[in-house]
Image (cartoon, rainbow, N blue to C red):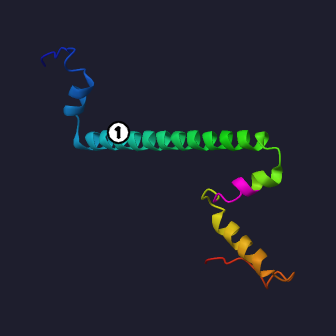
Amino acid sequence: MPEIAATQDMMSPMALFLHADVVVKAVMIGLLLASIWTWGIIITHSLRLKRINQATDSFEKDFWAAEDIDAFHLKRGKEPPSPGPTTPRWRWSRRASRRRCSPRPSACSPPFRR
C-alpha cells in the first residue's frame, strides 16, 4: 500500500469537510445553523436587557428626583405597563377592581383558558 503523506492542505477544516461523508456534512451544517440561531438569541436578549436597564435607570432617576410622590404617579402612572407574562392578569385585576367583585371567590374568578 502506498503511503499517503498528510499535507497541510489535506488537514484544513474546509478540505476535511469537503471529503467527509454526507451524514457528517449534514451534521456539521446542522451544528452551524444551531450556532447561528443560538448567537441570534443571545444578542437579541442582551439588547433587550440593555433597553430594560436603561428604562429602569430612567425611572429610578425620575423617582428619586420627584419631590411629591402623587405628582410623580400622575406623571408616570399613565404609561402602559410593559407587556409580559402577567399582562392578562393585570388587565383582569383592573377590570375586577372596577366591577367591585364580591368577596366570594367564584363570583369574580379570573378568566382561565383551557
Q: Which residue is drawn at 87% across and 81% down?
A: 103
Quadrant placement of the C terminus: bottom right
Q: Residue at x 45, y 42 (%)?
A: 38
Q: Give the range drawn in magenta.
A: 74-80
Task: Give yes or no for residue 53 being in the magenta stretch.
Answer: no
Residue 72 rendering spot, x and y as whole percentages = 76, 51
Residue underneath mark 1 = 32
Element type at marker 1?
Answer: helix
Residue 4 rendering spot, x and y as whole percentages = 16, 17
The answer to which of 15 and 88 lies nearer the viewer is: 88
The answer to which of 37 and 101 lies nearer the viewer is: 101
Q: Residues within 10 Å of mark 1 (few under 14, many from 20)?
A: few
Quadrant placement of the N terminus: top left
Task: Give yes or no for residue 78 being in the magenta stretch.
Answer: yes
Q: Which residue is drawn at 32% across and 42% down?
A: 27
Picture quadrant of residue 112: bottom right
Picture quadrant of residue 32: top left
Residue 106 rendering spot, x and y as whole percentages = 79, 84
Q: In this view, does 90 lie above or below 108?
A: above
Residue 92 rendering spot, x and y as whole percentages = 69, 73
